[in-house]
Amino acid sequence: MITVATAACGSEDEPAPSHPKAKPGECKAGERKLEDGSCQAAGIQDGGCLAGELALDGGGCRPAGIPPEMCGKGFAADADGGCSPILPADPCPPGKMAAPGETACRDVAPCAPGTWGDIPVEPNTEHVDAAYSGGGSDGTSQKPWTTIQDAIDAAANGAIVAVASGSYTEDLVIKGKAVRLWGRCPAYVEIAGRPLQIAAVLIREGAGGTEVRDLAIRGGSAGLLVSGAEGVVVQRVWVHDTGNRALDAEDTVGAAELTLRDSLVEAATEDGLFVLGATATIEASVIRDTKPDLSKHGGLAVYMTDDLQAKKRCDVTIRGSLLERNSETAVFVGGSDATIEASVIRDTRPRASDKTLGRGVYVLDDPIGGQRSTARISASLIETSHDVGVLVGGSDATIEATVVRDTQPQESDQLGGRGIEVNYDAATGQPASLSLSSSIVERSHGVGVLFGGSEATIEASIIRDTQPQASDQEFGRGIVIEKDRQQGQPANVTLRGSVIERNLDLGVFVFASNATIDGSAIRDTQPQASDQRHGRGVDAEVDPDTGQRSTVSVHASVIERNLEGGLMVIASDVQADGLLVRDVAVAASDGLLGDGVSLVSEDWIPNVSEGGLASVVLSASRIESSPRAGVSSFGGSVQLGGTALDCNAIPLDGEQSDALAYAFEDQGGNACACSGAEVICKVLSSNLEPPGPLPPP
């Protein structure tokens, strides 16, 4: 037996469920000294906040999750620390809509009495009525035009074109001037575009400021296309059952800008809204049930991409809107900029051709032009996607006060189902980045949040209840931080003031990458469903094929009520201060393992001068109630200082791993005890079995 500390040890009380701070003086084992000279217990942050709380700049602490004041307009705080949208319980029928904040389905716009309803009448208003048969049309209410195009051609710049009830089979062109095309209401006025035309309504250069209001658009081609015109507004319009895209804004003949407001887009083909090198805003609108094209591809709600030839990016804002039951991907961002606020994206369906995909939001750099995309998602809900809820590749995303939940696997192979995935793009050599704050990712499949060779900060967020991979009932991990598999680019992730709970297999898995865990709680990890194995809290591992190591820094965090082990380190490096590990349980499948902290060296790991040595530095930490060992080292190097080991079956265990000998370095101030009984901290060799490495998903 090797003695680490021979001084008498005092008993320790676990931190109270408040925000205590010890009086100035010498700190006991399991406490760290703060800058003001006071002592703080392990598992509590410097400012007194508990692990899993965010320390606010002005003082005070806020639990991880979405505070009620951050819920978006049209949302309400729920009992699970998140926000839920206010919407009707049942789907709206065709022609009816409800945007977030509305509890009942309604018409897109009301129908007022009279031939032209409540359309404003101005001196230069041009009237249209398909039922008029008196001849001599001049645009007055007594002698209205019988076609909309005649009224547009006759209208002065900025004039209203008032349209009475009727179905108008036309393909309108607005060019060289702005008009305000205004129907009585969408239920009674429709423009029916013909097949093989560009669009039912085409707004071209010189028509900036054009408005289309209170009517319906359908037909065999696209619904409405804007190119070369800015400031175009489409309001209280029902675009439906189009043979091509419902709405199209592109810079083909000049700058284009489109605002869709208080409108319903449904049953379009290919895309609800297509944006090429243009600007678009969607407000308080619904885009649903977009259909694939003849090749069974497409069906997206919003597709935006940069114009390579003109070198122009898209800038698209989606605010207070509902995107549901679209296909392949609800929102695709390619080499462009997107903002999604207070919106609901749900029930995205797989691609019709092969039953793959079904993603909520896909943010991707342009593989040809190399343009990174940016996306900001705030106060929104993304639920019941397939494959991935939010996917970021070689681009930058910010997600705040948003819930991503119930992501389902692909229908084709029952793989996937990740809530959020952030990947290095090997084609362009660009890592992705994510800032995730005050958000919830829950009930994903396989992995809650996956980082591949990318950069990220997670703050004040909750990742919980990840379900197993549907194909084989394996995994169910909370966060996976791994290197890019093609280029070996490590991921670098900071987890701060967050909660990772009730996941399966692993709470946080770091594979050949780097992680910082600060003021966070990783707890209640359960075994994977396939074999009832694992359930570890934090696991940092080497890539056995290349020798690429992981490095993890842990500060003022809690790892509790996990299985097999709280913190496990395989041929990698961990530094921890102010860490509290407690209440580990043995493996559910075989009753083995059960260590608070465990490290394993592997002398066969290639390309590593240290021979696969594992190292852990523990300072001012506390390990308690481990059924096997508080700290176990299998050929690894442990530095221990100011740390309390309380009520562990074996406080310290050292075992040789192949040709590698274990090493414990006493840095002083350690204490071992149980129920007030002091013991000397000694290293035992108990012929324990080491934990094995786990495969990346």
Image (cartoon, rainbow, N blue to C red):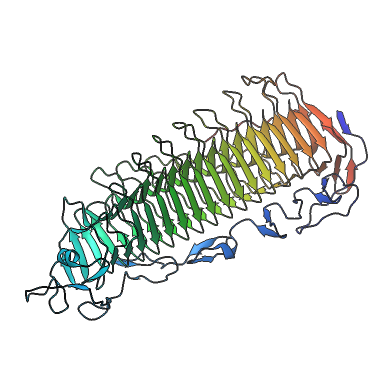
**Residue 279, relative to residue 610: is it above or below?**
below
Name the residue nearer the viewer: 455 or 418: 455
Q: Quadrant of residue 409?
A: top left
**Residue 48, relative to residue 672: is it above or below?**
below
Residue 334 pos. (x, y %): 40, 43
Residue 249 pos. (x, y %): 31, 52
Name the residue nearer the viewer: 332 or 141: 141
Dividing the image into 4 quarters, which one contains the N terminus? Answer: top right
Residue placed farthest to the bottom in the image?
Answer: 113
Residue 551 is left or right of residue 283, and the answer is right
* Image point (47%, 49%), residue name: 375
Residue 638 is left or right of residue 351, and the answer is right
**Residue 412, relative to residue 664: is it above or below?**
below
Residue 508 is left or right of residue 252, and the answer is right
Q: Quadrant of residue 647?
A: top right
Residue 412 pos. (x, y %): 37, 41
Residue 214 pos. (x, y %): 28, 69
**Residue 596, relative to residue 234: is it above or below?**
above
